[in-house]
Image: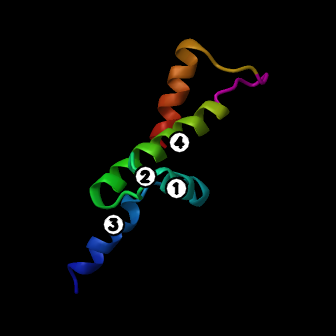
Amino acid sequence: MKKLIPALLVCMFALPAYADPAAEQACEAKAVSKDGKPLAGAAKASSMKKCMAGSKQASCEEKAVDKNGKKLAGAAKNSFMKKCQAS
């Protein structure tokens, strides 16, 4: 039992902080094979991971604006995106 509690804590905090339920449902709906059948197992996990990363990137792109409301570009955008995706 003493070994189970730390393992559960590690698993609990290993989940992505950006796991938005709406984005997760949208990604799950997109997790289908070429035949239109729902994916399962490792294929589904891979598809979900890729989709959620894309969702996170889109979210960061929307936030990449300066104090005047203009979109960031160049090095400023790259720096912002790196920090946003890391959090």
The label on residue 29 is 1
**Mark toward the start of the polypeptide (1 vs 3):** 3
Q: CA distance from mark 4 to mark 1?
A: 17 Å
Helix, strand or loop under label 2:
loop
Discs 3, 2 touching: Cβ within 8 Å: no
Residue 55 located left or right of residue 7? right
Query: Is residue 82 shown above or below 49?
Result: above
Q: CA distance from mark 1 to mark 3?
A: 25 Å
Task: Give the residue number, with chain letter if any, for mark 2.
Answer: 32
**Three-letter amino acid code at disc 2?**
Val
Discs 1, 2 touching: Cβ within 8 Å: yes
Residue at figure coordinates x 34%, y 49% from the top left: 46
Of marks 3 and 2, the one in the foreground: 2
Task: Give the residue number, with chain letter if any, for mark 3.
Answer: 11
Q: Nearer the viewer, residue 73 or 35?
A: 35
Residue at figure coordinates x 39%, y 67% from the top left: 12
Residue 64 located left or right of residue 79? right
